[in-house]
Amino acid sequence: MDVDPTEFDEPPLLEELEIDPKRIMEKSLAVLNPFKASAALVDVTETDLAGPITFCLTLAACLSVSGSRAQFGYIYGLSLISVMVMFCLISLMCNVADSKVTVSAVASVLGYSMLPIVGLSIVGVFVTLNNAYGMAIAGAAIFLATMSSSKMFCLMTGDPHQRYLIAYPSALLYAIFSLLVLF
């Protein structure tokens, strides 16, 4: 008995897990250029967590390779606490009854905006960042992550006037992650 392989139309594994690499790349490029209006930022209701989980794993792996004392638990614990605090903060600041603020949306935005900090940790594997140049690179990474996350949160809440209010706790959050990378 021969079995026809086209008889079984199973979806590929990534489609079954609802992981879209093209969409992850679009969101990642949108984070790296926060000053450009991007189509990837328009639909903030689409929340995938595959990219943020990958970025957190990459950050933890780079910290492990570079000999940092920070462990995987620090990254995940800090991520979980930051998502809950930012969700509470943004939902309290949002005055629209039908806002698009959900826990998974906040986790997605914070995770995708972590990309500059992940880039900093990749640089930290090869070069010591415990000097003035490292601090300058870390400042640029914090600024880039803060700008992209505050822009996405403003699109999510629908209130662009609160961008700097949202940017302050985001900057503090990414500063903590960059301190894990630097020291």
Image (cartoon, rainbow, N blue to C red):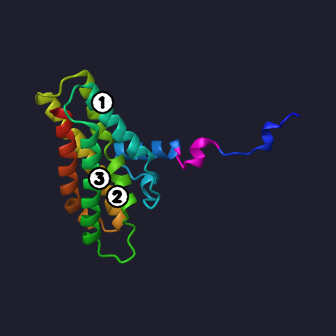
Badge 2: residue crowd in 10 Å (few <14, some 14–19, many ≥20): many
Residue type at numbered disc 3: Leu
Front-most of 101 and 164?
101
Residue 141 among magenta residues: no
Callout 2: SS:
helix
Q: Is 64 positioned to the left or the right of 45 in the image?
A: left
Q: Is residue 88 toward the left or the right of residue 18 in the image?
A: left
The residue where tag 1 is placed is 62
Q: Which amino acid does label 2 sit on?
A: Val
Q: Give the mark nearer the N terminus: 1 vs 3.
A: 1
3D distance between C-alphas at marks 2 and 1: 24 Å
The quadrant holding residue 126 is top left
Q: Residue at x 25, y 36 (%)?
A: 71
User: Residue 1, percent across and down?
Assistant: 88, 34
Report the number of numbered marks. Answer: 3
| Residues rendered magenta in the picture | 12-20
User: Which residue, as the protein is rendered here, is positioned at the far front?
Assistant: 1
Residue at image position (23%, 53%) is 170
Residue 149 in picture, x, y percent from top left:
30, 53
Q: Mark 3 points at which residue?
A: 80
Secondary structure found at label 3: helix
Say which amino acid is labelled 1: Cys
- Viewer-nearest of discs 1 and 3: 3
Circles 1, 3 touching at the beta carbon (< 8 Å): no
- Which of the 4 quarters of the picture holds residue 66? top left
For marks 2 and 3 on the same chain, the one whose residue lies earlier in the sequence: 3
Which of label 2 and label 1 is nearer to you? 1
